[in-house]
Amino acid sequence: MYLSIVNKSKFGVLVLFIALGIFLQCSSTQNTSNLKEKTEKLLEKELTKNNVHNAFLSVYSPSQSIDWSFAGGAFANGEQINLENPFITASIGKTFTATAIAILAEQEDLKFNDPISLYLPDSLMYHLHIFNGVNYSRQITIAHLLQHTSGLPDYFEGTTDGSKNVMELLFSEPDKFWNPVETIEFSKTKMQPLFVPGNGYNYTDTEYILLGLIIEKISGMSLHQYFEEHFFKPLNMKHTSMHLRSEPIEKTLKLSETFVGDIEVSTFTSLSADWAGGGLVSTGSDLIKFQHALFSGEIISAETLKTMQNWVPETRGMEYGFGLRKVNFKKLFPTLPNLTVIGHSGSTGSFMFYCPELDVYLAGTLNQTDKVKESVVLMVKVLSLIEDIS
């Protein structure tokens, strides 16, 4: 069943399957009095779809006086989902890791173009990137890692020497706890780099594990402690924590269930493999607190945020920066609205995006790896409703 997992690097390809007319179907004159109700109904419709057991959606716009959060569905035991049940955010965590690196850059503890060998031990750097017989390990920069341009393989879903990749091992060894260095050694011994650093694009969690180790080395804190001190506590993200590694600021309701097809995986200890690349659990409202603080200059300066938006092409209609993904809906599909969102998505159907044209923040999940496409469609429909009254 693990083969049904959505390949995170193919997010853009899935989006291209959005049916012609989605935008037209949901675009009609609205007014503010029924906009919230119509938005909630969009989420309710997702819950009627096969294998969507629970779903969350938060929408926020300071300029349009919108601040809504919705949750629906139930646990397998029949207990109803609550807004304060956190969910696995998957690769949304990359934005947190990249922002932590940006903070260290503003503090002049590192530079984006520094070689990673300045901050990582020789044992980890040894044979990290051997391509066509040439050792490029010490040519990899922090920017390469942030932007997925290092050429390193993806320990999660990449091609191995014939053995199982880590994504497959999540299912065959669900009780295994992975430490970060172990995942890097896995990629070094069982996989091959894809290109010379800086000469291509390949989405890989391996790079973000290395970034997490750099954050720990410079700060002297564990990654989850760094996140707590710089993000969770200052922003009052009281329901957010690093899965299997820390507790939230306040006692929180139990973790919502995440599905891969018909398999519930949120209890797997093997999810520890997704650390700095996506190991957070959170709520929609907490994610919006972070995203709003990031884009309003509360966490880093406007200049540094602009640097994080140094885009490289990812796939049609999509570009990638430093832990940020930009999606232009109209470039994805010509009938979609001419709107852009910036943020990140996850393989569980999770999303955290900001639409600058409408000043709207969106966050949530369908908690189902088979529904990544549907999560994008949901965002398009919500934004289209809001655009009609703007």
Image (cartoon, rainbow, N blue to C red):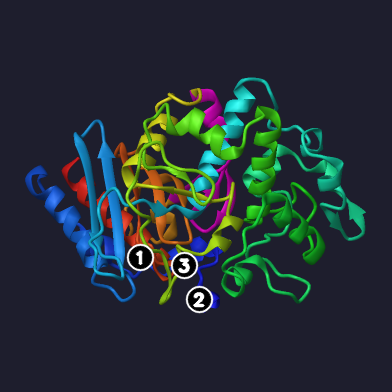
Q: CA distance from mark 3 to mark 2?
A: 13 Å
Q: In the image shown, does 100 or 200 lie closer to the viewer?
A: 100
Q: CA distance from mark 3 to mark 1?
A: 20 Å
Is residue 310 something that shows in the picture? no
Query: Disc 3 residue type?
Result: Val
What residue occupies the far bottom of the structure in this picture? Answer: 1
> Which type of secondary structure does the marked residue at label 3 adopt?
loop
Question: Which residue is identified by label 1?
Answer: 374
Query: Disc 2 residue type?
Result: Ser
- Circle number at residue 90: none
7 displayed left or right of 262: right
Q: In the image shown, does 370 or 21 lie closer to the viewer?
A: 370
* Residue 324 is covered by the magenta coloring: yes
Query: Disc 1 residue type?
Result: Glu
Magenta extent: 302-327
Q: Of circles 3 and 2, which is in front?
A: 3
Q: Position of residue 315 (x, y in %)?
A: 55, 58
Residue 151: quadrant of the picture: bottom right
Q: Of circles 1 and 2, which is in front?
A: 2
Q: Position of residue 364 (x, y in %)?
A: 34, 52
Q: Of circles 3 and 1, which is in front?
A: 3
What residue occupies the far left of the structure in this picture? Answer: 33
Question: Which residue is identified by label 2?
Answer: 4
Residue 163: quadrant of the picture: bottom right
With respect to residue 118, does 139 lie above or below?
A: below
Q: Position of residue 62 (x, y in %)?
A: 25, 31
86 displayed left or right of 218: left
* Residue 217 is covered by the magenta coloring: no
The numbered mark, 1 or 2, whose residue comes first in the sequence reads: 2
Question: Which residue is identified by label 3?
Answer: 265
Q: In the image shown, does 235 or 364 lie closer to the viewer?
A: 235
The residue that appears at 70% across and 56% down in the rendered structure is 183
